[in-house]
Amino acid sequence: MSTANWKVERLAGAIGAEIFGVDLSRPLDAAERAALRALWLEHGVIFFRDQPLSSAQFLAFAEGWGTPVEYPFVKGLADYPVIIEIKKLEHEKVNFGGVWHSDTAYLERPPMATLLLAREVPPYGSDTLFANQYLAYETLSEGMKKLLDGLDAVNTSAKADTTRTREDRLAEVGRSDAASQYEATHPVVRTHPETGRKALYVNYAHTARFAGMTEEESAPLLQWLFAHQKKEEFTCRFRWRVGSLALWDNRCTHHSPVNDYHGFRRVLHRITLAGDKPRR
Ligand code: SIN
């Protein structure tokens, strides 16, 4: 395989690209890995089609990208504890992670990246939306940037809308060793360690308040930021097929799965990769 045969198609103006001509079932060489990494850093999330990887192949690809870590609340597959199932069954109404977020921002070191591989998909619906948080920051006024550049925010795993999106899975495969709540304070604007660009780093699912302020004091500006950071012009929308694989950068993107397929089953396998402590 050579990168010369790859085809890159952007999904939207702001974020997301599909990469064709890559076979992820076999090891990538250094040049291929570097080329994919550059595309990923440029587009925030990259997608591949027709990758029916075994768990071992999926894990091997993930390990070539970073260090897989276990999800704090949900147990992984018996033989692959770092692979969790994102599952919504025919009778269920709640979808896992079904609000805009960056993954587990309530950890001291939130994950750098997440990989999601579709195993079973409904006949329609269940797309995932992604939003570019560099653009969310860069489109703010100079005054707002200056204000936010100096702020930290408290992120928690206990926001009600978020815990609701996990409840079915926790009943089935919840981890007994999970803390009851995780909380971490991070800069509201973080500098991406690889690109050097600044991105907005609050999110609807986890950010409860600005550090040093009450929730009530923080709410007006946070609500404004939550609405701003998911503006349509910052987003793309990905339609899943069995074997589709998405790889997103949690340091500069948000995502939200659309819950529009009640009565059908959807199963994806997910791996998250270790990240660093967010810095200004
Ligand atoms: C997630 O937040 O990891 C779930 C995304 C999805 O189900 O599309």
Image (cartoon, rainbow, N blue to C red):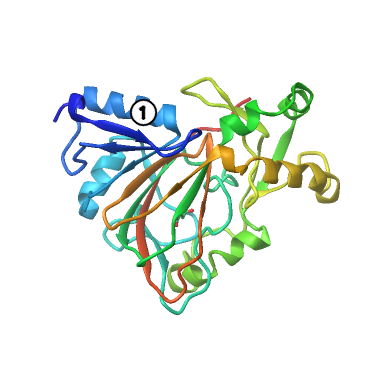
Residue 211 image offset from top left, x and y in percent: 76, 39
Q: What amino acid is found at the position of numbered circle 1 in the picture?
A: Leu
Q: Is residue 23 above or below residue 51?
A: above
Decide if ligand 1 comes within 8 Å of the CB at mark 1: no
Furthest residue toward right: 217
Quarter of the image for the C terminus: give it. top right
The image shows a total of numbered marks equal to 1
- 67 left or right of 109? left
Q: Quadrant of residue 188?
A: top right
Residue 278 image offset from top left, x and y in percent: 58, 32
Q: Is residue 200 above or below residue 176?
A: above
Q: Residue at x 61, y 44 (%)?
A: 230
Q: Is residue 222 above or below residue 52?
A: above
Q: Which residue is tagged 1?
A: 39
- 113 left or right of 2? right
Regarding residue 109, the answer to whether it shows in the image is: no
Q: Quadrant of residue 79?
A: bottom left
Q: Residue at x 45, y 69 (%)?
A: 261
Residue 262 image offset from top left, x and y in percent: 47, 73
| Residue at disc 1, secondary structure | helix
Furthest residue toward left: 1
Q: Quadrant of residue 17?
A: top left
